Image: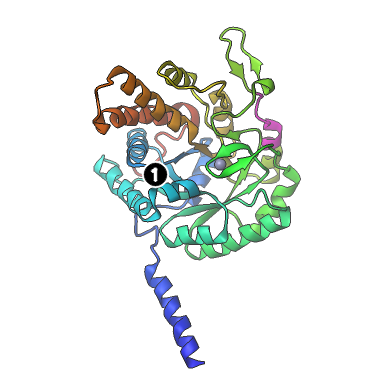
Amino acid sequence: MERFFYFCNRNHLKNTINMVSYKELGLVNTRKMFAKAVDGGYAIPAFNFNNMEQMQAIIMAAVETKSPVILQVSKGARNYANQTLLRYMAQGAVEYAKELGCAHPEIVLHLDHGDSFELCKSCIDMGFSSVMIDGSALPYDENVALTRKVVDYAHQYDVTVEGELGVLAGVEDEVAAEESHYTKPEEVIDFVTKTGVDSLAISIGTSHGAYKFTPEQCTVDPATGRLVPPPLAFDVLEAIEQKLPGFPIVLHGSSSVPQDEVDTINKYGGSLKAAVGIPEEQLRKAAKSAVCKINIDSDSRLAMTAAIRKAFAEKPAEFDPRKYLGPARDNMKKLYEHKIINVLGSNDKLENA
Ligand SMILES: [Zn+2]
């Protein structure tokens, strides 16, 4: 019996010693950031990253616009880039922001679409300051129970948690759903109260990926011939806001799929047919409401791919990766700055720049 306790205690000690607190890495959680964003009528950018150039572009854009920022890592990105590397990259991001002249950067390291308690715990133990537990595909009661379990663990370490109600259509890494189901406003109070989540991702017609809608779901703009997607369900958003006044709401799948990037990709040998996103005016409108975090991933992928395809086509003899990843980084930075200033409105919102 004594031996048994000895081993248990040793394991406990080992876990404690191996834990990395995000606070030691200079990161922040989302609590204060979201409260300010809801009050101020803007949204915090949540940009996914998988590699160094993306991270550099995100941090450069955030520093130059004096914006708080959420660095988002999906399960797929964690498998692709390695969890240890990502953690040190996030720590590096804080130091890099300071080196670029931002004395007090506000950077969150967030797990996007955590699908199990174990994955969320592992991220919290490795220095993430925020996690999402996505139980939206589960029956309601199971979603509540799983989310509650993650919140109980995360809050011990002052890590914030995003939950999700409603299902988004589309494909994002390993998250895929054929059909969307709008969030039911009548469920949100019960869900937030029972789980204790810090923010709630909802479904109001946004969708993952670069093909958010089929051509049949869209109308055609007679002036440009481009597809125009169906509008977001702002009535559902308003009903949710009335149930949960001031509570932080999150929008996933909110890339706008810039047509100039799609055109560049197609011009230089790509084949993106009928890619369509959420119009930026609609995201701007959402950002002014209780929506305080807007997730953007596909747009950055498009900006990167467009710049690389162009560089390859224009300089076929070039084989120095810096000569095509550099322009890709520049193009992503331009995109991030545009989103921050013209769509989210999070520029100049650092507490102490
Ligand atoms: Zn998502």
Q: Is residue 16 visible?
A: yes
Q: Position of residue 256 (x, y in %)?
A: 53, 27
**Ligand 1 is found in which quarter of the picture?**
top right
The answer to which image quadrant residue 267 occupies is top left
Can residue 236 be found in the magenta stretch? yes
What's the amino acid at mark 1?
A: Glu
The residue at the far top in this view is 223
The image shows residue 170, relative to residue 88, as above or below, that is above
Q: Quadrant of residue 264?
A: top left
Could you tell me if residue 288 is visible in this image? no
Q: Position of residue 119 (x, y in %)?
A: 51, 58
Q: In the rendered image of this protein, does residue 257 appear above or below residue 247?
A: above
Label 1, ligand 1: CB separation under 8 Å = no
User: Can you say whether 31 is above or below 318 in the image?
Assistant: below
The one nearer the camera, 181 or 267, is: 267
**Residue 252 colored magenta?**
no
Q: Quadrant of residue 174?
A: top right
Front-most of residues 159 and 121: 121
**Residue reaching furthest front?**
317
Residue drawn at (42%, 80%) of the image:
10
Q: Which range is magenta?
A: 230-238
| Quarter in which the C terminus is drawn | top left
- Is 83 or 346 nearer to us in this picture? 83
Instruction: Name which residue lies at 66% across and 24% down.
Output: 230
